[in-house]
Amino acid sequence: MVGGSQGNMTPHVSITVIALKTLTLLLGGLITFLAYRAYRRTRAQSLGALALGFGVITLGAFLAGAGNLIFSFGLEQSLLLESGLTAGGFIVIVYSLYATK
């Protein structure tokens, strides 16, 4: 297997995880781009925060995958990184839903 410690993951599961992470990155990137484009068009602070929140979540998915596969982070370290950035991204998204203007 490539890079990090995969534990007892079979090659089939590893490929599936990589495929799902790739899909997550593509969809998260698209949502971030569309929210940012809406922010640029309207200059609404809430849309800017929404784009930032989805960007942070997407970044977390990317860094966790890259950390595990490329930089040999342990599975627990990768999960902690991804969970922390996901929680932070959701905090920003909640703020964006309550922001005015």
Image (cartoon, helix red, strand yellow):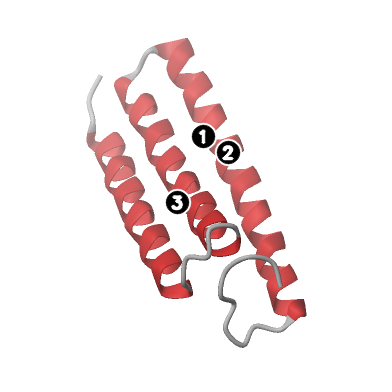
* Residue 50: % across, % down: 38, 34
Q: Residue at x 54, y 50 (%)?
A: 62
Residue 43, compared with residue 100, is above or below; it is: above
* Above or below, comparing residue 42 to residue 16 in the picture: above
Task: State the image coordinates of residue 57 (x, y, percent, origin top left).
Answer: 43, 48
How would you rate the neighbour count of disc 3 (Cα within 10 Å): few for under 14, some for 14-19, many for 20 or more?
many
Name the amino acid, label 3.
Gly
Quickly name the residue at label 3. Answer: 60
Contact between marks 3 and 1 (CB within 8 A): the answer is no
Which dot, 3 or 2, sits closer to the camera?
Answer: 3
Q: Is residue 78 left or right of residue 98?
A: right
Q: Quadrant of residue 98?
A: top left
Label 3 or label 2, whichever comes before in sequence order: 2
Specify the label residue 29 is tagged with: 2
Given this view, does label 3 or label 1 mark the residue nearer the observer?
3
- Give the distance between the C-alpha atoms of the residues marked 3 and 1, in whole angstroms: 13 Å
What quarter of the picture does the N terminus occupy?
A: bottom right
Q: Mark 1 = which residue?
A: 32
> Mark 3 near mark 2, Cβ–Cβ under 8 Å?
no
CB under 8 Å between discs 1 and 2 = yes
* Disc on res. 59: none
Q: Which element type, helix, strand or loop, lies under badge 1?
A: helix
15 sits left or right of 54 in the view: right
Cα distance in 3D space between marks 1 and 2? 5 Å
Residue type for callout 2: Gly
Residue 76 coordinates in the image, percent (x, y): 41, 74
